[in-house]
Image (cartoon, grey):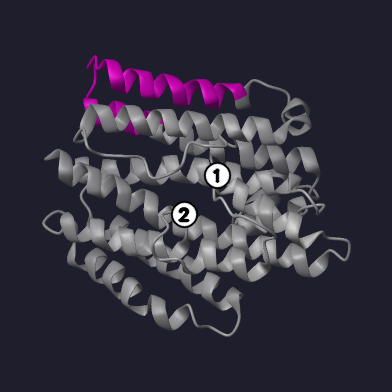
């Protein structure tokens, strides 16, 4: 596969997943602002921008957060920007992706201006999550499990691990007590799966353990780190020795085992720092994947500042 095609597929996976999880994160943040009577809103808003590596000067209002993370089409960390970028990468990889996936991404980009004017941000976030689900459903149903599928899934897995880590960091936002664990489970579409698996009421340690290291739930961090490791092995083939790919797997494996073999209480005691380590591992792996498979001019779109 041409490196430019592989790169476009990788970034389609990352961008669609980023839009989905940014919508989830913003929905949680706005609910916390509404429900917490003691919230220091400017501090909480500044913290959520910091979690997403966005710089902003002066006091940060709710509308500033939405403009920056939801509606700014020129920013790679905003919902509108990522959806537009996903469609642009789909155009570059048009000969590889299916017509259904292309039409879904194109329609989503075309409908963005109308939905960004929705009367309530929650309606916009629900629409974004539904469009991401449509893209992934069509991709799953119409794509052969070859390298095209692998690169898109690789981008999706790395981005999901990174974004779930950012979502968990909202537990420690300045100026607010943050969302409770039941809210976080619901935000990750994990509440029902948690109840079926754990068969107990939601507690801090059990919920954190489920979102961090459950090996069967597709939105846990460990699941996605392991999935990215497996895909890298499948792309290179059995028995292949590729230094950069091996280093990427090593970075992901270290981050995964650091979560799996540590006491959950220790992780919770230093949750923001632990989640930053996950983000660093994903960024390192992404850089190594770029150097191994893509053109030298490729760049990772997340800012590495504050990681």
The residue carrying mark 1 is 217
The secondary structure type at the circle numbered 1 is loop
In terms of secondary structure, where does tag 2 sit?
loop
Q: Is residue 255 magenta?
A: yes
Residue farthest to the right, as pictured: 38
Residue found 29% across the figure and 58% down from its top: 139
Q: Which mark is residue 77?
A: 2
Q: Position of residue 301 (x, y in %)?
A: 38, 45
Q: Nearer the viewer, residue 226 or 284?
A: 284
* Residue 97 showing in the rendered view: yes
Please provide percent x and percent y for residue 24: 58, 60
Query: Residue at the spot x=29%, y=70% of the render?
Result: 104
Instruction: Identify which residue, 119 or 135, lies in the foreground.
Output: 119
Examine the image and state in which quarter residue 109 appears: bottom left
Q: Is residue 233 above or below residue 77?
A: above
| Residue beneath the point at 31% across and 59% down | 86
Question: How far apart, in angstroms, are the residues tagged by discs 1 and 2?
Answer: 25 Å
Give, as a single range, the part of the protein colored magenta.
Answer: 229-258
Q: Are marks 1 and 2 in contact (CB under 8 Å)?
A: no
Of marks 1 and 2, the one in the foreground: 2
Look at the picture and state if 203 lies above or below 12: above
Q: Residues within 10 Å of mark 2 (few under 14, many from 20)?
A: many
The count of marks equals 2
């Amino acid at each position: 596969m041409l490196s430019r095609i592989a790169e476009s597929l990788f970034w389609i996976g990352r961008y669609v997943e980023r839009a989905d999880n940014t919508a989830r994160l913003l929905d949680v943040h706005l609910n916390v602002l509404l429900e917490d009577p003691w919230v220091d809103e400017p501090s909480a808003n500044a913290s959520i921008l910091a979690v997403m590596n966005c710089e902003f000067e002066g006091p940060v209002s709710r509308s500033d957060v939405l403009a920056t993370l939801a509606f700014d089409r020129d920013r790679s960390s905003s919902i509108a920007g990522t959806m537009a970028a996903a469609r642009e990468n789909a155009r570059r990889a048009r000969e590889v992706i299916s017509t259904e996936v292309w039409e879904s991404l194109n329609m989503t980009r075309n409908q963005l201006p109308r939905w960004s004017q929705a009367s309530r941000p929650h309606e916009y976030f629900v629409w974004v999550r539904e469009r991401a689900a449509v893209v992934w459903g069509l991709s799953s149903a119409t794509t052969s499990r070859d390298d095209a599928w692998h690169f898109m899934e690789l981008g999706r897995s790395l981005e999901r691990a990174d974004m779930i880590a950012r979502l968990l960091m909202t537990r420690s936002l300045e100026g607010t007590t943050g969302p409770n664990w039941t809210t976080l489970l619901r935000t990750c579409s994990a509440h029902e799966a948690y109840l079926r698996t754990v068969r107990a009421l939601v507690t801090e340690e059990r919920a954190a353990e489920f979102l961090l290291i459950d090996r069967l739930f597709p939105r846990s961090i460990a699941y996605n780190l392991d999935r990215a490791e497996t895909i890298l092995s499948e792309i290179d083939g059995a028995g292949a020795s590729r230094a950069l790919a091996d280093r990427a797997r090593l970075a992901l494996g270290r981050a995964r085992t650091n979560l799996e073999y540590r006491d959950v209480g220790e992780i919770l005691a230093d949750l923001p720092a632990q989640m930053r380590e996950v983000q660093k591992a994903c960024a390192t792996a992404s850089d190594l994947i770029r150097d191994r498979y893509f053109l030298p001019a490729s760049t990772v779109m997340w800012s590495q500042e504050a990681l």
